[in-house]
Amino acid sequence: MADSSRAARTAESRSRGIRATGRRRKGPTRRRRALTITLCALVSCVLLGGAGLGFVYYQLDGNLKGVDIDAALGGDRPDNVDNGSMDILVLGSDSRAGDNAKYGADEGGARSDTAMVVHVYKGHKKASVVSIPRDTLISRPSCTKGGKQAPGAQHVMFNTAYEVGGPACAVKTVESMSGIRMDHFVEVDFSGFKKLIDALGGVDITTKKAIHDPDSHLDLDPGTHTLGGEQALGLVRTRHGVPGGDGSDLGRIQLQQTFIKALMDQVKDVGVLSQPTKLYDIGDTATKAITTDTQLNSVNALVGLAKDLGGIGSNHISMATLPVTYDPNNPNRVLPLEAQNKQVWKALREDRAIPKSALKDSAGDKGGTSDYVR
């Protein structure tokens, strides 16, 4: 009886074009260092808050790009375990080709500046987001790109996985680190981020103290601001504009996580009936800006996912950074805190909240920005 019930749930999910269950196994230059976690977060916000956009997505199928992760990785993945949860790897590429050239020279390959594992809990009413810093030194598995084998490597930066093997290698690396099978992946870039923010009409941010960073072209006095795409990009890129921060990518992630929640609230406020033109612009811009796995590579699948996750509000999203410590041999790199990492991934595999003890000694979740933006 239990098997037939599970089969019915699976068939219903497939009819909406998505996999609605978790898949789990037991057991450079200043410009190039800009993290794009919030580019990724924007797409997550559209998915987590965008069920109302469905009626226009059906016109936009031709905008979407997809990568067949399952074909690329084959059986070399964590086991599928059906516990009602879902995991999405959300990536940001730092390619400087095309519209992104203004943010630095194109050095012949894209990297994922950072990544988020979005874990949606059973029932799909709440989620945890774990940011993986781009400079985390990890063991990278072997990957294949364009028919060429890239051997595995030890003690290399996390973002090199995307560089040597594209999205499939990034997914494989995260699955190797976590033991969690990613149900989906979504990727977006700098120019897509800016255009989406502008299509939304900007995002409201309140600064409690001044934030000034000439490198990011950011000049915000205390008060409430509606940030357009260029200013929003400056905010999520700044490392030196917040005196209370440590000037590192880790400090910037905290600032970005504050922005993510503001962005989610903004997406929730987009009216379906009152602003149809705005909704179409958002849908058109979003579908042009993102690359997904092939299971999400249709408006039908995106609408199904948006409806499934549309009840998750910003107050039901918990944010964390993978527990790390600064590398004593290179302050520009961070090392995973292995015991705490195991706690984080074990909790998500078991569909539990991340314990506070896992983050206690991490350099990634110390304060520094909360006094500046809310």
Image (tube, grey):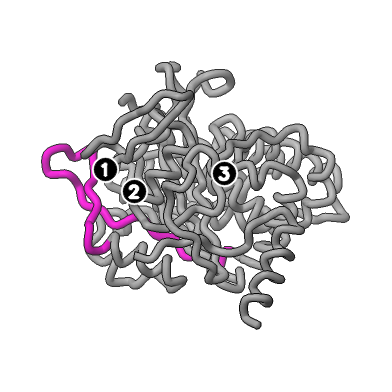
Crowd band around label 2 with a 10 angstrom C-alpha radius: few (<14), some (14–19), many (20+):
many
Image location of residue 273, percent across then percent down: 87, 55
Disc 3 is placed on an element classified as strand
Q: CA distance from mark 3 to mark 2?
A: 24 Å
Tell whether 226 sits left or right of 320.
Answer: right
Q: Residue at x 66, y 51 (%)?
A: 46
Q: Can residue 235 be seen in the rendering of this structure?
A: no
- Amino acid type at image mark 2: Gly
Q: Residue at 30% across / 31% down in the picture?
A: 151
How many C-alpha atoms fall within 10 Å of the one at disc 3: few (<14), some, or many (≥20)?
A: many
Query: What is the three-letter code of the residue carrying label 3?
Result: Val
Q: Mark 1 sits on what residue? A: 139
Tell me the mark number nearer the camera, choosing from 2 and 1. 1
Q: Is residue 343 visible?
A: yes
Q: Residue at x 39, y 48 (%)?
A: 174
Label 2, label 1: how many angstroms apart (C-alpha)? 24 Å
Per the rendering, the mark at residue 186 is 3
Magenta residues, as a range?
Answer: 314-340
Graded by Cα atoms within 10 Å as few (under 14), some (14 to 19) or many (20 or more), the crowding at tag 1 reads: some
**Nearer-N-terminus badge (3/2):** 3
Say above or below: 205 vs 294.
Answer: below
Image mark for residue 251? 2
Is 293 in front, or is 45?
293
